[in-house]
Amino acid sequence: MRPFILINSLVATAFAAEPWLNEPDTGLVNFLAGTNYTEKSLPPLKDIRAIVDFDWAAEQFLSNERYSFYRTASAGEWSSWPPIVTM
């Protein structure tokens, strides 16, 4: 009975593992594969269909350091608390 419980928990854990995706798939990558798009360049603005495609385009075009700043910029308003007030 114990081996069954152990195997059952291991199988359940293995099936529960899913890859984490940064953004949902909007089909932009598949669409750009049929065009003259080259890796690490900006896609034409007319081909971007959703807001998450802007994030994908930024990840493709920016360096890792700049993309990391872009991704965490929304948390920047909490970076200096209490606020620094200069007169």
Image (cartoon, grey):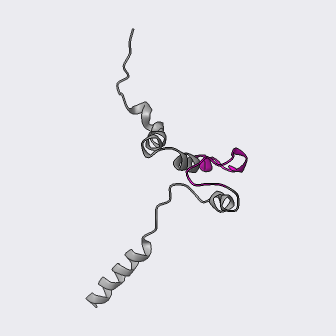
Q: In which quarter of the image is the C terminus?
A: top left
Residue stretch rendered in magenta on the structure? 37-54
Check the image and report above or below for 84 versus 46.
above
Please report the residue visible at 57 percent of the width from the left and 51 percent of the height from the top: 56
Please report the residue visible at 47 percent of the width from the left and 37 percent of the height from the top: 73
Q: In which quarter of the image is the N terminus?
A: bottom left
Q: Residue 41: image x %, image y %?
A: 59, 48
Please report the residue visible at 44 percent of the width from the left and 31 percent of the height from the top: 77
Looking at this view, is 80 or 7 the one in front? 80
Q: Residue 52: image x %, image y %?
A: 60, 50
Looking at this view, is 28 or 37 the one in front? 37
Count how many numbered circles sit on residues in the image: 0
Q: Residue 45: image x %, image y %?
A: 69, 44
Check the image and report above or below for 63 versus 36.
above
Residue situated furthest right in the rendering? 46
Looking at this view, is 9 or 36 the one in front? 36
Residue situated furthest bottom in the rendering? 1
Q: Is residue 35 magenta?
A: no
Q: In this view, does 60 lie to the left or right of 72?
A: right
Our reading of the magenta stretch's main secondary structure is loop
Please report the residue visible at 40 percent of the width from the left and 32 percent of the height from the top: 78
Q: Does the magenta stretch include residue 49?
A: yes
Residue situated furthest top in the rendering? 87
